[in-house]
Every structure is written in C-alpha cells, then in structure tokens.
C-alpha cells in the first residue's frame, strides 16, 4: 500500500469512508481473497487520464478491465478516479471514487448469490 497516504477517503455509489492505510491494507487483502474466490483471473489498467488540479494535486481517472472465469474471461470494464497528492518524494493517493456499484455489477454478472 505504498501508493496511499497515511489517511485517505474511499467513496462510491453507496457512500464514503475515511480510513488509515494499515486498515485499508487488511481490507484489500481480504478483498483479493474474495475476488479469487469468485474466479477473477486478471485485472489491468486499460487507460488513464490525468488532470492537474494544482501544483500539489492531480486527479487521475483510471479505466480498469477485469476478467472472471464465470464470464468466459470476457473483459468487464469500470472506472475509478484517484486524487493524488504530489508533495514530498513520492506521490500518494489521498482519495479514490469508484464510479460503479461493484456489488450490484457482480450480482448482475452472476458472480454473487
């Protein structure tokens, strides 16, 4: 989790939460296990579009593609926007917003019961 600030906000269609990087790392590990359990076979960045907000901050919209065994490895696409702080030796994510409702999309794909 070196790309995340010590504290940051994650948000999506169902709301937002402020959390610490260590807490998020634990959740991310559980999420990775979950994705493997529902048959995710790959995840990759398809495109990125960066907009400078100021010298210290930028917004990066990332268009992701993932595949799952149950969907015949058909590419499922979604967007996440990241707000980046460019202070210090390394840039850090201070907020990200998922554009789609992930749980709803997974149900529609038949990945969840």
Image (cartoon, rainbow, N blue to C red):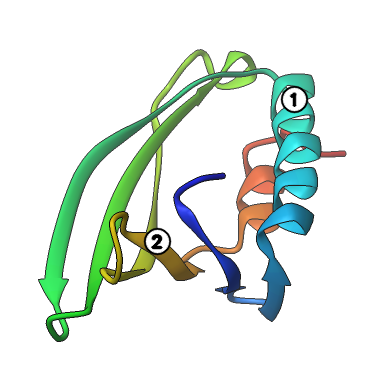
Classed neighbour count for the residue bearing mark 2: other residues with Cα under 10 Å, few (<14), some (14–19), many (≥20): many
Circle 2 residue = 92
Residue 82: x, y in percent?
Answer: 37, 65
Q: Which mark is residue 88?
A: none
Q: Quadrant of the N terminus?
A: top right
89 displayed left or right of 47: right
Residue that extends furthest to the right in the rendered view of this protein:
113
The quarter of the picture where residue 68 lies is: top right
Q: How many numbered circles are shown?
A: 2
Circle 1 residue = 38
- Residue 39, relative to residue 23: is it above or below? above
- Residue 45, relative to residue 12: is it above or below? above
Q: CA distance from mark 1 to mark 2?
A: 30 Å
Q: Are marks 1 and 2 in contact (CB under 8 Å)?
A: no
What residue sits 36% from the left and 66% below the top? 81
What residue sits 78% from the left and 32% below the top? 34
What residue sits 30% from the left and 65% below the top? 88
């Amino acid at each position: 989790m070196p790309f995340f600030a010590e504290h940051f906000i994650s948000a999506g269609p169902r709301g937002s939460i402020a959390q610490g990087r260590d807490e998020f790392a634990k959740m991310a590990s559980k999420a990775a296990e979950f994705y493997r359990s529902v048959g995710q076979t790959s995840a990759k960045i398809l495109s990125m579009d960066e907009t400078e907000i100021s010298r210290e901050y930028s917004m990066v919209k990332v268009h992701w593609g993932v595949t799952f065994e149950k969907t015949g490895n058909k590419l499922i696409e979604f967007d996440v926007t990241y707000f980046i702080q460019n202070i210090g030796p390394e840039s850090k994510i201070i907020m990200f917003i998922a554009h789609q409702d992930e749980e709803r999309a997974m149900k529609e794909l038949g990945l969840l019961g």
